[in-house]
């Protein structure tokens, strides 16, 4: 259950007796409009670009107001963007399709997405182990064979939750995430865990690349992202890079089995796991 009050920028969440309020104030509250360069920086390791040209369908899980659609259109990537998030503006054009829903209540279409991106959304806002596990299981069910789920971070919870009755700590999230990821791996998914040390600062990542798309992204980054925000991105990334791995935020990329029949068998098992969690 969620209730959103746009007037005082509050999201009230109440699930299974765990309650929390999140602050959406554009200045004091959560950040919910990160743009493509930040997704590129945090969701793909150093050596990789975030998208594959053949990808058609991209799902943003908790994409907020990140205008990924506009960035991709300007660089000539035709992928269709779907965003599932509590928060939306009726005039929003950040995605082609928008579901104003709680991801946990949303019926994710099976085998539908080439990529799913969750940046500072879920499982960060999971209120319990059940929710964290439900997030990973539902998200990978939605992947096409060879589709990729990219998540950062898997082991953090937002500051707002400190004033609520959410007791789910970041260390516990890490343990639980690693455990469910091992189960998903056994079903034939490729699971790659990485740290900010394995990522690359977005300006370096784009400047080192000889792709024309990346060059366009770089000029858009300079033109459309304020100097203040660019400085913030650089400083934040530097802080992550300097944190020891055992205390650092963790990213994960999960690739679905390439073969349709292997994904199909995995789906049957994942649905059983989901049923056991939601019973
Ligand atoms: C900190 S914002 C990040 C938004 C965007 N990904 C970005 O990086 O700017 C977290 C987003 O996750 C969304 N969110 C959290 N839990 C969710 C859930 N259970 N279902 C749908 N959206 C959720 C929030 O509404 C919010 O827009």
Image: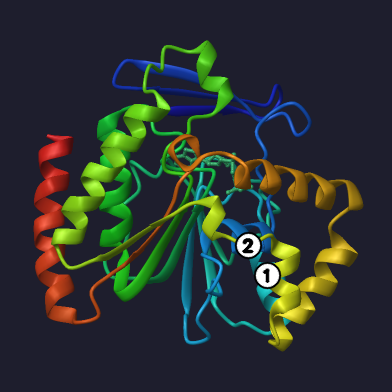
Which quarter of the picture shows residue 75? bottom right
At horizontal 62% and vertical 60% (from top left) the residue drawn is 41
Which quarter of the picture shows residue 87? top right
Q: Residues within 10 Å of mark 1 (few under 14, many from 20)?
A: some
* Residue at the disc numbered 2: 200
Q: Can you see residue 118?
A: yes
**Which percent across, then down, holds residue 127?**
38, 27
- Secondary structure under the numbered disc 2 in the rendered image: loop
**Left-right relation of 31 to 142:** right
Compare marks 1 and 2 and give the one earlier in the sequence.
Answer: 2
**Left-right relation of 75 to 12:** right
Q: Can you see residue 93?
A: no
At horizontal 43% and vertical 69% (from top left) the residue drawn is 115
Q: Are marks 1 and 2 in contact (CB under 8 Å)?
A: yes
Quadrant location, ligand no. 1 = top right
**Which percent across, then down, holds residue 24?**
66, 30
Of the numbered discs in the image, which one, if any, rests on residue 205? 1
Q: Residues within 10 Å of mark 2 (few under 14, many from 20)?
A: many
Vertical comparison of 262 with 252: above or below: below
Between 189 and 203, the one lying in front of the other is 203
**Which percent across, then down, holds residue 153?**
48, 45
Between 152 and 247, the one lying in front of the other is 247
């Amino acid at each position: 259950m969620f209730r959103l009050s746009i007037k005082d920028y509050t999201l009230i969440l109440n699930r299974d007796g765990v309650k929390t309020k999140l602050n959406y104030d554009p200045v004091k509250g959560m950040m919910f409009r990160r743009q493509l360069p930040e997704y590129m920086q945090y969701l793909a390791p150093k050596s990789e670009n975030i998208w594959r040209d053949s990808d058609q369908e991209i799902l943003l899980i908790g994409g907020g107001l990140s205008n990924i659609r506009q960035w991709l259109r300007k660089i000539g990537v035709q992928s269709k963007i779907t965003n599932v998030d509590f928060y939306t503006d009726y005039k929003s054009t950040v995605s082609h399709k928008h579901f104003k829903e709680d991801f946990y209540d949303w019926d994710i279409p099976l085998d539908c997405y080439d990529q799913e991106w969750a940046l500072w959304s879920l499982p960060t806002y999971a209120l319990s182990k059940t929710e964290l596990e439900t997030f990973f299981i539902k998200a990978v069910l939605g992947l096409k064979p060879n589709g990729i789920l990219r998540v950062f971070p898997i082991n953090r919870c937002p500051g707002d939750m400190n004033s609520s009755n959410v007791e789910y700590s970041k260390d516990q999230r890490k343990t639980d995430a690693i455990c469910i990821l091992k189960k998903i791996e056994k079903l034939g998914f490729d699971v790659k865990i990485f740290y900010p040390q394995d990522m690359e600062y977005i300006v370096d990542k784009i400047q080192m690349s000889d792709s024309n798309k990346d060059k366009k992204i770089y000029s858009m980054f300079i033109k459309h992202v304020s100097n203040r925000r660019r400085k913030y991105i650089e400083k934040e990334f530097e802080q992550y890079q300097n944190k020891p791995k055992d205390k650092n935020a963790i990213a994960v990329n999960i690739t679905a089995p390439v073969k349709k029949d292997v994904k199909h068998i995995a789906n049957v098992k994942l649905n059983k796991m989901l049923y056991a969690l939601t019973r």
